[in-house]
Image (tube, rainbow, N blue to C red):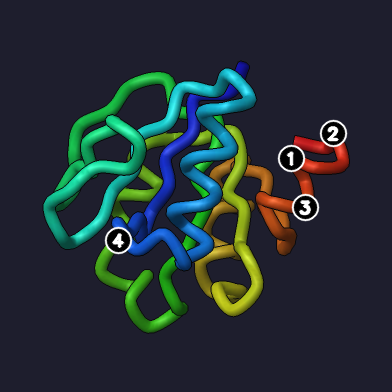
């Protein structure tokens, strides 16, 4: 199973970050949701700021490229194996920075990847 950080997590059940956190958990992945508001997603507390987390396999992004800029150092500093840029989060600058550090990048949808067994 892949330890996954969901950046841009929301308590709004209609948001894709909520659904992704829920489905990742249901598929047995350890999920660390990180967002700006307090709350939980099906009992998993949403972390705030830039929590120190070890052993991240995947970061799945739910922040637009402009909001990602404040997290560049944090994202790259976690040294994930890959970063998934969900639709609307594609960011050529962060993709380039990640690849330069040997981090795999994918412009894909986490929900589709999970439902098709490609995660």
- Residue 116 is situated, as x and y percent measured from the top left of the image, at 87, 41
Mark 2 closeness class: few <14, some 14–19, many ≥20 residues within 10 Å: few
Residue 26 visible? The answer is yes
**Are circles 3 and 1 on residues that touch, CB within 8 Å?**
yes
**Left-right relation of 1 to 42:** right
Determine whether, in the image, residue 107 is placed left or right of residue 64.
right
Instruction: Give the SS element for disc 2.
Output: loop
In the rendering, at what x and y percent does residue 106 appear? Answer: 72, 55
Precedes in sequence: disc 4 or disc 3: 4
Which residue bears the numbered disc 1? 114
State if disc 3 and disc 4 touch (CB < 8 Å). Answer: no
Q: Residues under labels 2 and 1: Cα distance?
A: 5 Å
Tell me the residue that label 2 is attached to.
117
Looking at marks 4 and 2 on the same chain, the residue that comes earlier in the sequence is marked by: 4
Instruction: Describe the element under mark 3 as helix, strand or loop.
Output: helix
Looking at the rendered structure, the secondary structure element under dot 1 is: helix
Q: Which residue is mark 4?
A: 71
* Residue drawn 33% across the image and 21% down it: 54
Of 48 and 16, nearer the camera is: 16
Q: Earlier in the sequence, mark 1 or mark 4?
A: 4
Q: Residue at horizontal 44%, vertical 53%?
A: 18
What residue is drawn where x is 62% and y is 16%?
Answer: 1
Mark 2 or 3, nearer chain start: 3
Asked if one can make out residue 72 in the rendered structure from this viewpoint, the answer is no
Q: Which residue is mark 3?
A: 112
At label 1, counting other C-alpha atoms closer than 10 Å, the crowd grade (few under 14, some 14-19, many 20 or more) is some
Distance from Cα at disc 4 to Cα at disc 2: 29 Å
Q: CB under 8 Å between callouts 2 and 1?
A: yes
The residue sitting at 55% across, 53% down in the picture is 98
């Amino acid at each position: 199973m892949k330890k996954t950080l969901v950046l841009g997590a929301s308590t709004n059940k209609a948001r894709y970050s909520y659904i992704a956190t829920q489905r990742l958990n249901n598929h047995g992945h350890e999920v660390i949701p990180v967002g700006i508001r307090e709350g939980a997603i099906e009992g998993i507390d949403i972390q705030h700021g830039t929590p120190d987390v070890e052993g991240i396999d995947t970061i799945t992004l739910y922040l637009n490229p402009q909001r990602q800029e404040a997290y560049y150092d944090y994202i790259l500093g976690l040294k994930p194996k890959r970063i998934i840029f969900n639709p609307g989060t594609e960011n050529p600058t962060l993709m380039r920075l990640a690849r330069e550090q040997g981090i795999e990048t994918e412009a894909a949808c986490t929900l589709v990847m999970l439902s098709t067994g490609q995660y």
